[in-house]
Image (cartoon, helix red, strand yellow):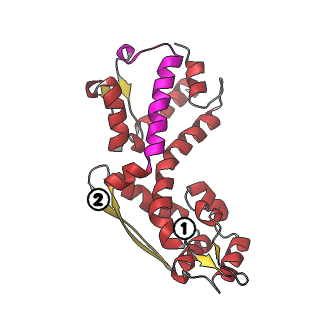
């Protein structure tokens, strides 16, 4: 099997650095969280609001809300004085003062870790329940969002379709069939999302899936690799 070509199929050039691999992994994992924020949270933060810079109503730029959908873009946007000043101007004429005030508070306070911890927690709970609530209460930000597994799975349909296509392309690229695969190791919290787990079960068979130490296997593997390299 040509594993360098397999990496290329995953969007990584042959000989990709460890930093590139980590970035690709983080980007994949962040997609589901970003969908939750965009579909369930941003409507409560004035995503559909309008304001009147002159005589006419105009929509709020969506870039402000896209910026809070991923932990790293929120980190860059947080405490950005230009964005906060723009929101201060918008709030004078906006038709959703409450939502945009919460957006301003999120950008000004910058509680990125706590915010995405709440998002991640809701996603994890949906792996074992049909519904949950995303609750985030921090200073002037008070969010309580109802979520269902069905709605969540619909929102990530593009991402799960891309995962399925990637699996098929990877097998074709390395010249293997699903019958050639003896065991499938799943790791990371995203692999516990039922719709993702089912993708692998449907293609390879549930009996081939090994998902022990889902949350620690990557760290353990890195530790063993460090031991092998550096003693």
Q: Main secondary structure of the magenta part?
A: helix
Q: Residue at x 36, y 34 (%)?
A: 199
Q: CA distance from mark 2 to mark 1?
A: 25 Å
Q: Which mark is residue 111?
A: 1
Q: Could you tell me which quadrant the C terminus lies in?
A: top right
Q: Residues within 10 Å of mark 1 (few under 14, many from 20)?
A: some
* Residue 117 appearing in the image: no
Q: Percent position (x, y) of residue 80? A: 70, 69
Pointer 2 or 1: first along the chain? 1
Image quadrant in which you'd find residue 66: bottom right
- Label 2, secondary structure: give it: strand
Q: Residues within 10 Å of mark 2 (few under 14, many from 20)?
A: some
User: Which span of residues is magenta-colored?
Assistant: 156-180
- Label 1, secondary structure: give it: loop
Q: Which residue is mark 2?
A: 131
Q: Is residue 25 above or below residue 155?
A: above
Q: Percent position (x, y) of residue 67? A: 61, 61
């Amino acid at each position: 099997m040509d594993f360098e070509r397999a990496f290329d199929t995953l969007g990584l050039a042959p000989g990709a650095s460890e930093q590139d691999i980590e970035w690709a992994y983080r980007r994949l994992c962040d997609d589901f969280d970003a969908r939750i924020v965009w579909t369930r949270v941003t409507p409560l933060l004035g995503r559909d609001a309008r304001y009147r810079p002159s005589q006419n109503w105009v929509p709020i730029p969506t870039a402000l809300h896209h910026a809070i959908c991923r932990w790293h873009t929120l980190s860059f946007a947080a405490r950005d004085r230009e964005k906060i000043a723009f929101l201060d101007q918008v709030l004078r004429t906006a038709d959703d003062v409450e939502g945009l005030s919460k957006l301003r508070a999120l950008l000004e306070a910058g509680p990125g870790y706590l915010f995405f911890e709440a998002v991640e927690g809701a996603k994890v709970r949906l792996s074992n329940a049909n519904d949950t609530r995303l609750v985030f209460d921090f200073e002037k930000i008070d969010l309580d969002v109802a979520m269902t597994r069905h709605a969540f799975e619909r929102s990530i349909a593009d991402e799960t379709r891309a995962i399925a296509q990637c699996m098929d392309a990877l097998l074709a690229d390395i010249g293997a069939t699903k019958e050639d695969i003896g065991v499938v190791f799943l790791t990371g919290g995203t692999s516990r999302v039922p719709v993702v787990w089912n993708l692998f079960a449907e293609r390879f068979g549930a009996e081939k899936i090994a998902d022990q130490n889902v949350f620690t296997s990557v760290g353990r593997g890195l530790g063993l690799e460090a031991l092998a390299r550096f003693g």
